[in-house]
Amino acid sequence: MSIEKLVVGPGRVETLTDEQEKKLKQVWAYMLNFFGFKVVPPGVVRTASRRSTNASSIVSSDSKKKSGGFMGRFKRSSHKRSNSLEKLERVLSHHSTHSIDEESGFHYCFKGLDSKDMYEAFWTFLRHDTPDNLVLRFVRARKWNVDKAMVMMTNTMKWRWYEGKPDKVLFESELGCKESGKDGVMYQLEVGKCVIHGHDLKGRPIANVRARLHHSSDQTMDEVKIYTMMTIEYARLMLTEPVDTCDIVFNLSEMTMANMDYAAVSYMVKCFEAHYPESLGILFVHKAPWIFAGIWKIVRSWLDPVVASKIVFTNSTDDLAKYIDRKHILKELGGDSDFEWNYLQPTKSKNGHVSDDEEAKEAIEEERKQILSKFIHKTIDWIETTDGTASRALLDERIQIGRELAENYKKLDGYIRNRSVYDRWGDVTFKLPTD
């Protein structure tokens, strides 16, 4: 069986309806307003004067020097933190007319946050996604409720910048973990607790989780979190639009209660649901033993209904083969793939940056700054136009500029991210411009 024809799904920037386009404009207006650009969200009337912010300072040539470059400043903020995601969503669902904070003029979800931190958090999060489709993951996840999408996205930006710091995890990667003595992370890599290999019939990468290899005593909970974030971020690097989701195969064969770790499962569920929305294709629960029935009652109660709807229980290779070509199913699952996990220990020469040429890196970062400035100002034109034909033309221009940003990241990647085992195997294919 071959990969099915890849098509752009509904609710992506290339396939927006007029009403969906209006909602996307509103999200961008809220964000750009907070970042310092004078944009009024569609349909919103200001009742108080807005805080004046110098937008040019955010994208100025010396902004990266202030913030520590593309990787930014991975330190905790001293700023007042916003309320929890759940509380804010409840507030906004009952008081949608008060989504603009009258004192600051910004969307309520930004209250107490540093605009430069959030600006860096969003654009560092982007990688080789296009900006609109990254934003639309959150909008679709909240069923096109703009206020709830704003809360969810801001919560993720805070988590990425102040708490989980997955960008730091990815950029330092395996070499960083080895050099800093995170033995529990290295152990999970060595045994291959989760192996990203192959793709399904829709071209989605597959993360194969081997539950029998997990024992909570083998690593700390912090090391479980780092390994989880690292694996998710590796999978993101393997996505190329229009493929924007991954599959997970939970292989529960040979699993016993000794392998069950509710804290690890809870973290994984919350991580996906809160911070990587619309990223899951299918979650296969394969060969669940009888003991899983009791576990499932607990785990199911944690799941968002949308995530729960993507779970498929399989008991045989034939069940998996309805979704995955047998050549991409691991032999341990009864498939034809000859792939075996043989972890290569990270070394500076094999797993460091592809290049440490600072002059070349700065040139690519400068190009990125220029593309980003062009995208932002084109976005402002798109938001503010009242002509439908002009709006669609500007949207098309923005889509192209977004793709330029994605290509720019691919050039920058080798200068800022330590290589992973998947880079060494050729599963991540970003190359330097001279390659």
Image (cartoon, rainbow, N blue to C red):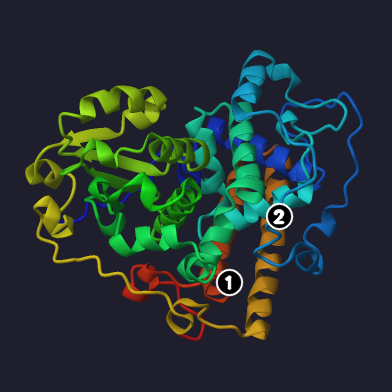
User: Residue placed at 75% from the left, 66% from the top?
Assistant: 64
Please tell me which residue lies in front, 180 or 403. 180
User: Residue placed at 44% from the left, 79% from the top?
Assistant: 347
Check the image and report above or below for 413 versus 59: below
Please, what secondary structure does the residue beneath circle 2 have? loop
Report the residue that reaches farthest toward the top.
94
Q: Position of residue 285 (x, y in %)?
A: 23, 38
Could you tell whether 435 is left or right of 150 in the image?
left
Badge 2: few (under 14), some or many (20 or more) residues near its Cα, within 10 Å? few
Residue 400 visible somewhere in the drawing: no
User: Residue placed at 18% from the left, 35% from the top?
Assistant: 288
State the quadrant of the N terminus.
Answer: bottom left
Q: Are marks 1 and 2 in contact (CB under 8 Å)?
A: no
Please, what secondary structure does the residue beneath circle 1 have? helix
Please tell me which residue lies in front, 256 or 160. 256
Q: Give the quarter of the image for residue 281.
A: top left
Q: Position of residue 33 (x, y in %)?
A: 77, 42
Q: Which mark is residue 75?
A: 2
Q: Amino acid at mark 1?
A: Ile
Query: Marks 1 and 2, Cα distance to the nearest angstrom?
Result: 18 Å
Please tell me which residue lies in front, 245 or 398. 245
Q: Which mark is residue 416?
A: 1
Badge 1: few (under 14), some or many (20 or more) residues near its Cα, within 10 Å? many
Q: Give the quarter of the image for residue 159.
A: top right
**1 vs 2, front mark:** 2
